Amino acid sequence: MSNTPVNNGRRRFLTISTSVVGGAGVVGAAVPFIASWNPSAKAKAAGAPVEVNISKLQPGQLVRAEYRGKPIYIVRRSEEIIANLEKVEGELRDPNSEEAQQPDYAVNRHRSIKPEILVAEGVCTHLGCAPTYHKGNFGEMVEGVDYGFFCPCHGSKFDMAGRVFAGVPAPLNLVVPKHSFPDENTLLIGVDQGEA
């Protein structure tokens, strides 16, 4: 054992210095770690609203957009297509949109804010395939129906409101994303009408 007197001031200084350096190290390591929890710019962009110019969309025409990595089908329905929505309701699994596949303001026959504009995810509710849009020749698959969506993977069929026909593998109607119309020529996907 040494008989050297203990310098308590020096001991305190070393303890405090070591604590400060250790604390700085912990903070230095924690900052990038915590920052990694923030969503990336790509992830932020994936959830950002998508604006679509619909001014040149013709009756019966479909355009595609992408929102949150999913295809969005946008169709301008003619007055004839809108009138025919009622005619097929007896053949549909969920004609009144009772399953929560759309925002509250789209729980109607046309499943949208504007009857003439359909906005729906182009993803079959069976196994996630992309249904094809049939314009004018859908009657070959569904008697008396000229327009609709057909999933080539397993044969699911949807009307022009994205409502699924009975007797097909898809259990639910197509999903209708939040959407709004800031003006007559602009569709905003990902923002509810009240939020626009």
Image (spheres, rainbow, N blue to C red):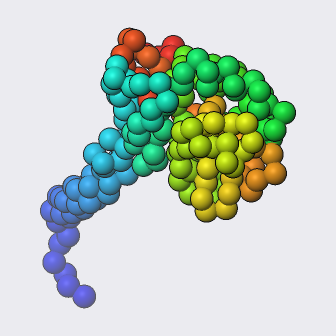
Q: Is residue 8 above or below residue 82?
A: below
13 or 51: which is nearer to us? Answer: 51
Visible in this render: residue 173?
Answer: no
Q: Report the quarter where the N terminus lies.
A: bottom left
Q: In the image, is 55 to the left or to the right of 105?
A: left
User: Which residue is found at the position 20% from the left and 85% from the top?
Assistant: 2
Residue 167 visible within the image: yes
- Total labels: the figure holds 0
As rendered, which of 40 and 111 lies closer to the eye? 111
The residue at the far right in this view is 90
Work out whether 43 lies above or below 160. below
Q: Residue at x 79, y 38 (%)?
A: 92
Task: Please determine whether, in this image, residue 44 is positioned above or below residue 151.
Answer: above
Q: Looking at the image, which residue is at 55% across and 43% down?
A: 134
In the displayed structure, does residue 118 sit left or right of residue 163?
Answer: left
Q: Position of residue 6 (x, y in %)?
A: 20, 70
Q: Quadrant of the C terminus?
A: top left
Residue 53: x and y, percent?
Answer: 33, 24
- Seen at 61% across and 62% down, the residue is 153
Q: Locate residue 176, reporting x and y percent.
A: 58, 34
Q: Quadrant of residue 151?
A: bottom right
Is residue 137 depicted above or below 15 in this figure? Answer: above
Judge from the rendering whether residue 117 lies leftward or rightward of residue 155; answer left or right.
Answer: left
- Would you identify the image quadrant in which residue 106 lies? top right
Front one among 47 and 178: 178
Task: Tell me where residue 104 sits by quadrant.
Answer: top right
Image position, residue 13 (x, y; %):
17, 58
